Image (cartoon, rainbow, N blue to C red):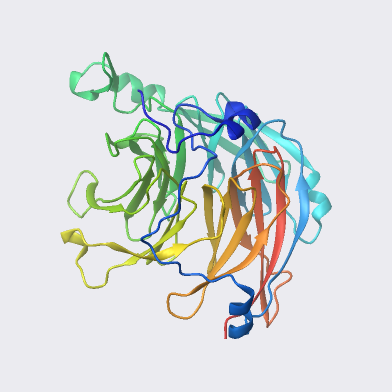
């Protein structure tokens, strides 16, 4: 399948990070910011003084070294941090904010095939998405010693065999090639789990997303040609909406309504002028954040005046600006939005009164673009006046950094 880059590449990023670029991978360059979308955050010193905004304290508490290639994916589960690299490797780190030294004790969980694009964890199972078009399932056998065993590779042999003969199980994937609908035929770029952990959603550069049952790994549905170009991100709401962000500059909203056998397209959100690399959704599903190569994080909110069934779902309310290069990753923790960029920084945003946002912190220290983020609350250092969080960032400099963020409570 031939498809243009989500963003145009530049010579500097290609020479500095040569093998990161592939046919569909998000470029490290940036496009012009969105002129028609108002900014929601003012970051000037005078604004902070006028509003008497309290200071946010932040510090880098650890730098985790061990990967010899780009860090593509991160995921937190309890006291453990998992990381996936561009050279097939999955590592586990002991995550303990009260004792940063423990973070340097890491083990290789597994070495699969193809760069590890995404990691999600449900109970005692780890799911990893790979650049070789496969999804792998790992059993966490012992919580103390953290031993791991590969349980399955998706699609499973059973799925492949049962779909082999009937001709209606085949879909066109290239001009002269067909494949069964259970197969991804390009890199699996993102994974997401349903709130109850029973379903796994996978998005791919092959322009499809698929739904798998986590109990027996059966592929239940494939939405073919969901986009006109590679899908880079997927996000799920608790009320059943699926959001997919693509290199075609669009976000599409999907839902499987009661009585339906398949997901239907509910809405198409168009505002970005370049490929979309990342999505993040608020816990109540009312606000969606999208990051792209246009250096902007677009903020979408539910349109309370319309009916979802009629297609009116999300509307643009503004954009968060400050990064000087492409937005590569987003994550949410509590009421904070964390963004990672090709400009090598992480920004921490929080919504204030109404639709105003403030950039609470800019985290600097990586020597390469920030490719992935994960975060969690740090109750051990929170107080009656502040909330504390731990943010982990993975970069193309091959390092993972742990950051402690102390944020004043909103009054």
Where, quadrant-wise, is the N terminus in this rendering? top left
Residue 355 appears in the rendering: yes
Of 58 and 121, which appears nearest the observer?
58
Return the x and y of residue 277 as percentages of the image width and height.
46, 45
Q: Residue at x 20, y 44 (%)?
A: 261
Return the x and y of residue 186 as percentages of the image width and height.
41, 26
Q: Quarter of the image holding residue 180?
A: top left
> Vertically, is 375 above or below 93?
below
In this rendering, the count of numbered labels is 0
Q: Residue at x 72, y 49 (%)?
A: 401
Q: Residue at x 36, y 28 (%)?
A: 3
Of 124 and 35, which appears nearest the observer?
35
> Vertically, is 14 above or below 119?
above
Q: Quarter of the image holding residue 156?
A: top left
Return the x and y of residue 265 as percentages of the image width and height.
23, 48
Where, quadrant-wise, is the C terminus in this rendering? bottom right
Asked whether, in this view, residue 41 is left or right of residue 1, the answer is right
Return the x and y of residue 399 as percentages of the image width and height.
72, 41
Query: Which residue ends up furthest to the top in the rendered image?
Result: 176
Asked whether, in this view, residue 394 is left or right of residue 38, the answer is right
Of 33 and 75, which appears nearest the observer?
33
Q: Residue at x 61, y 51 (%)?
A: 77
Residue 88 appears in the rendering: no
Asked whether, in this view, residue 299 is left or right of residue 395, the answer is left
């Amino acid at each position: 399948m031939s498809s243009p880059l989500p963003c145009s590449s530049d010579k500097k990023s290609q020479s500095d990070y040569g093998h990161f670029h592939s046919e569909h991978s998000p470029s490290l360059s940036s496009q012009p910011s969105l002129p028609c979308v108002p900014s929601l955050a003012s970051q000037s010193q005078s604004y902070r003084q006028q509003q008497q905004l309290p200071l946010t304290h932040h510090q880098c508490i650890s730098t985790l070294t061990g990967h010899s290639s780009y860090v593509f994916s991160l995921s937190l589960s309890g006291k453990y941090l998992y990381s996936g690299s561009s050279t097939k490797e999955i590592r586990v780190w002991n995550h303990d904010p009260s004792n940063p030294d423990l973070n340097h004790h890491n083990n290789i969980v597994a070495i699969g095939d193809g760069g590890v694009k995404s990691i999600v964890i449900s109970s005692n199972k780890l799911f990893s998405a790979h650049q070789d078009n496969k999804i792998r399932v790992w059993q966490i056998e012992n919580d103390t010693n953290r031993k791991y065993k590969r349980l399955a590779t998706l699609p499973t042999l059973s799925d492949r065999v049962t779909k082999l003969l009937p001709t209606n199980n085949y879909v066109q994937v290239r001009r002269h090639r067909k494949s069964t609908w259970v197969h991804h035929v390009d890199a699996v770029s993102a994974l997401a789990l349903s709130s109850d952990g029973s379903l796994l959603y996978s998005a791919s550069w092959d322009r499809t997303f698929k739904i798998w049952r986590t109990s027996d790994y059966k592929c239940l549905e494939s939405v073919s040609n969901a986009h006109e170009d590679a899908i880079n991100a997927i996000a799920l709401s608790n009320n059943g909406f699926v959001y997919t962000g693509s290199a075609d500059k669009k976000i599409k909203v999907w839902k499987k309504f009661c009585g339906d056998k398949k997901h239907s397209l509910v809405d198409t959100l168009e505002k970005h002028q370049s490929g979309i690399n990342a999505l993040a959704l608020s816990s109540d599903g009312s606000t969606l954040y999208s990051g792209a190569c246009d250096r902007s994080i677009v903020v979408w909110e539910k349109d309370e005046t319309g009916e979802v069934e009629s297609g009116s779902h999300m509307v643009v309310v503004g954009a968060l600006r400050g990064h000087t290069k492409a937005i590569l990753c987003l994550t949410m923790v509590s009421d904070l939005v964390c963004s990672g960029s090709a400009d090598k920084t992480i920004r921490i945003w929080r919504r204030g009164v109404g639709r105003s946002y403030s950039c609470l912190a800019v985290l600097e220290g990586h020597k390469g673009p920030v490719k992935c983020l994960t975060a969690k609350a740090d109750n051990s250092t929170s107080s009656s006046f502040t909330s504390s969080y731990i943010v982990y960032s993975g970069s193309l400099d091959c390092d993972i950094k742990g950051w402690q963020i102390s944020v004043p409570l909103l009054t």
